[in-house]
Amino acid sequence: MKLSNKKTLLKKEQILSAAIDIVKKRGFSGATMEEIAAELLMTKGSLYYYFKNKSDLMYQCHNFVLSQATEELEEILAKGGPVKEVLRKMIEKHIHYAIEEKETFNLIMEPKRYFNKEQLELVLKLRNYYEGLFDEIIQRGLKSGDFHAEDPAIARMIILGAMNWIQQWYRVDGRLSKEEIVKIYYDYIIKILE
């Protein structure tokens, strides 16, 4: 890769990082190109060298976060171990992203609302792959005899739906810590699968 391409890639990552931080603070609608540019000591026009528009930037932010989460789940699956422990780690990781990357990760809930047709196809493809990682651990559990879900696809939808809903009610200063939420969710999810 040419040095100029490396510099461009590095700058895009810096912009994505700043944009993700601003989206966390202000939400998707509240984040502006001006604020993102100011955070990086750039002009608004300079952002358009890297991204077509705000929608493109938000798509790239979402894709960046979802790709990171996907890679981390892949690593957990690749390391292996007892099925229930692997599932617990996957639940912990998903909840981490649902809480820590709430605004960016939340775009997964209603992608049609935020992305154009081309972006939507790519988002849904990555989202389906991500869901498939949970299918994989459920299948491992069925094969090992640890899980006995009658309809694994429905079980996965219930699991991910419940974990995604955390974004709607979780508060940093709420009565439950992130660790307590992971334990509670794991305990209920295991009951669904056993």
Image (cartoon, rainbow, N blue to C red):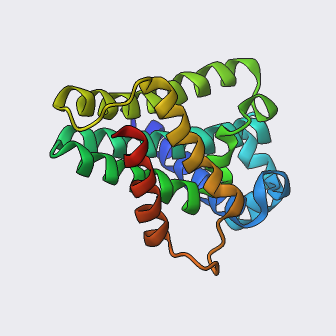
Q: Quadrant of the C terminus?
A: top left
In this picture, is 155 found above or below 120? below
The residue at the point 61 percent across, 42 percent down is 62
In this picture, is 36 found above or below 116? below
Relative placement, left or right, of 93 versus 47 is left
Q: Quadrant of residue 149?
A: top left
Relative placement, left or right, of 69 versus 12 is left
The residue at the point 62 percent across, 39 percent down is 60
The residue at the point 59 percent across, 41 percent down is 161
The residue at the point 32 percent across, 46 percent down is 87
| Foreground residue among 49 and 127 | 127
* Percent x, y of residue 123: 60, 28
* Percent x, y of residue 29: 84, 52
Q: Quadrant of residue 129?
A: top left
* Percent x, y of residue 100: 55, 62
Q: Quadrant of the N terminus?
A: top left
Q: Is residue 51 visible?
A: no
Total number of numbered discs in the rendering: 0
| Foreground residue among 67 and 187 | 187
* Percent x, y of residue 11: 55, 50
Q: Is residue 191 visible?
A: yes
| Foreground residue among 95 and 21 | 95
